Image (cartoon, rainbow, N blue to C red):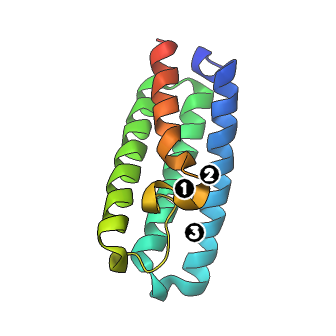
Amino acid sequence: MSSIGSGPGRALIAVYGLFSLAAGARAAVQIATRFGEAPLAYSLSAFAAAVYVLLTVALWRGARRLALAALLVELAGVLIIGTVSLLDPAAFPDETVWSAYGKGYLFIPLVLPFVGLLWLRRKR
């Protein structure tokens, strides 16, 4: 395991792994059972899950550049989707992981990319 995946980085890997499972399972069930109700929201949740999987693997393997790129995608996603979901709630008839800045997940999706970016900076 690399330096970015060691020490407190292990906790970050664990949180991203947990979010990968939570977002992925939620999106899979929503897509399989109700995709027609909110295709954009459910597709965005699946995309968020894929980003979380990528981050988990990148941090575990010490792929700093990949982790940085994925963290920036995550941050942009949570900020853009969070803002749009508040400004135009009709566009999101059901929540995504990033809706309302991750309100359904205790705002952890909003805080997590900042923690990840700080960790990468610290381990530079």
Q: Which residue is mark 3?
A: 27
Which amino acid type corresponds to the residue marked 1 in the rendered image? Answer: Ala
Contact between marks 2 and 1 (CB within 8 A): the answer is yes
User: How far apart in space, not on screen, are marks 2 and 1 (Cα)?
Assistant: 5 Å
Looking at the rendered image, the quarter that the N terminus falls into is: top right
User: How far apart in space, not on screen, are marks 1 and 3 (Cα)?
Assistant: 8 Å
56 shown above or below 117: below
Which amino acid type corresponds to the residue marked 3 in the rendered image? Answer: Ala
51 shown above or below 32: above
Q: Is residue 37 left or right of residue 20?
A: left
Task: Give the percent coordinates (x, y) of residue 27.
Answer: 57, 68
Q: Secondary structure at mark 3?
A: helix
Decide which of tag 2 and tag 3 comes sooner along the chain: 2
Task: Give the percent coordinates (x, y) of residue 112.
Answer: 53, 39
Dot 2 surroundings within 10 Å: few (below 14), some, or many (20 or more)?
many
For image coordinates 59% across by 27% down, the residue present is 61
Contact between marks 2 and 3 (CB within 8 A): the answer is no
Q: Which residue is mark 2?
A: 20
Q: Secondary structure at mark 2?
A: helix
User: How far apart in space, not on screen, are marks 2 and 3 (Cα)?
Assistant: 10 Å
Which amino acid type corresponds to the residue marked 2 in the rendered image? Answer: Ser
For image coordinates 63% across by 50% down, the residue present is 19
Q: Quadrant of residue 8?
A: top right
Contact between marks 1 and 3 (CB within 8 A): the answer is yes
114 or 25, nearer to the observer: 114
Task: Give the percent coordinates (x, y) of residue 85.
Answer: 37, 67
For image coordinates 40% across by 75% down, the residue present is 92
For image coordinates 61% across by 17% down, the residue present is 2
Dot 3 surroundings within 10 Å: few (below 14), some, or many (20 or more)?
many
73 shown above or below 47: above
Q: Which residue is mark 1?
A: 49
Q: Is residue 11 left or right of residue 33?
A: right
